[in-house]
Image (tube, grey):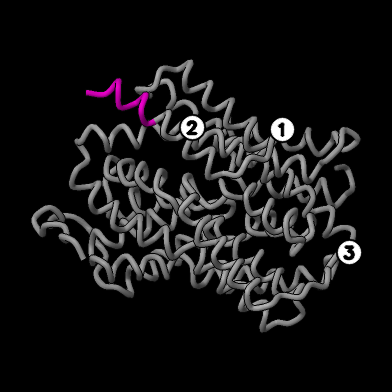
Amino acid sequence: MTSPPSTEQLHDRPRPTSLPDLFVAFTVLALQGFGGVLAIVQRELVERKRWLTQDEFIEDWAVAQIMPGPNVVNLSMMIGARYFGLRGALTALAGMLAVPLVLILLLAVVHARFADNTYVAGALRGMAAVSAGLIAAAGLKLSTALARSPVPLPWCLAIVAVGFVLVALLKFPLAYVLLGLGSLGCILAYRKLR
Amino acid sequence: MNGAIQITLAWHDWLNLFGHYLLLSLMSLGGAISTTSEMHRFLVEQHGWLTQAQFNDSIALAQAAPGPNVLFVALMGWKVGMNAGSTTAAFLGVATTMIGILLPSTIFTYQVAQWGHRNRELRAVRAFKQGMAPVVIALLLSTAWILASSAGGSSEHWPLWLLTLASCIVIWRTKLHLLWVLGAGALLGALGYV
């Protein structure tokens, strides 16, 4: 849609050869990602296929992270767009979602049949507890970035703490929290940056 | 299926569901998982379209299955449809929630990513990227808290809290593959320890 990447920029390194190639690459990638796909994207596309450099990956990831929408979906779209414009974005998106979606619906049907089984129910309870830990760990991993943030660290911690209290404990609607605390963070960052 | 409820969805309920997911899509900074608390408020507390157990199962199954975590949204749609009484409704539920959660964010992100990439040196662009970081972290931690407390609930379920805490630390501090941690959680749950 908007300007496709210049050809010389992509000339001398590996790239997806066609839309089907892109689709298959993202499907394979998605199917390896248990409990999240990000780590797999980095290993497959940067280290193995070398479609992206480490720096490009980090840059794209920062944008994918901060934009609304599922991070990995955003990231795959941006990478697809890099090579084939809008068609590439849609193909990468479809590759990421189509087969896993079918798979998870099959799992849901199977699960519904065995849900009364105490072992299955127990296993899911255990996995839910682990999932909670996994998400908290993602938050903690990201929090190391706060030390490098232009927003002063005490402000960062205050925003994290107030956000947590409002959303987790007081069950405030998300939109107000995003607008209020988000604009506070952006303004603080803007004042510090040159 | 376990704990299934009977609900009736009129056409305006479907529209309401779709509209809500369209809005959630634009609010899902930091990934769809960060809007989980809002989905919980809407689906479980406000409308009663999903039970607490179904809500938790959706997230746990999506974490356990390969593919992007956003597929938990499809599972919620599937279960709302099943509660409404038919497989057709379940497919409609999947389409409603998935299109809802993806459409606005992908259009927006695609446009903004193209624009942001061209203007990545702008002070406002960098301020936005970095200023939102503490809010994103607050949302992740809140999601973990809500998941853990809905799985564990009261203090008599302390083994579940302990499992959440332990898996958080393991994932945060080590490079152990997530599958091992999820597997351990499933095993502990199936054997009745948590």
Q: Is residue A12 above or below residue A159?
A: below
Q: Quadrant of residue A34?
A: bottom right
Q: Specify whether B149 is left or right of B95.
A: right
Q: Specify whether B188 is left or right of B165.
A: right
Q: CA distance from mark 1 to mark 3?
A: 26 Å
Provide the chain ID for the residue under circle 3: A
The type of residue carrying mark 1 is: Ala
Q: Residue at x 76, y 75 (%)?
A: B8
Provide the chain ID for the residue under circle 1: B
- Give the class, few, some or many, for how many residues have Cα within 10 Å of label 2's Cα (few <14, many ≥20): many
Q: Is residue B156 above or below residue B41?
A: above
Residue A138 counted in the magenta span:
no
Nearer to us: label 2 or label 1: 2
The type of residue carrying mark 2 is: Leu
Decide whether the magenta segment is chiefly helix, strand or loop: helix
Which residue position is annotated with label 1?
Answer: B166
Q: Is residue A62 above or below residue A98?
A: above
Q: Which mark is residue A181?
A: 2
The magenta segment is A186-194
Task: Specify whether disc 2 shares its chain with disc 3.
Answer: yes
Q: Specify whether A17 is left or right of B153.
A: left
Secondary element under disc 2, as helix, strand or loop, is: helix
Q: Quadrant of residue A84?
A: bottom left
Q: Quadrant of the N terminus of chain A?
A: bottom left
Residue A46 x %, y %: 33, 49
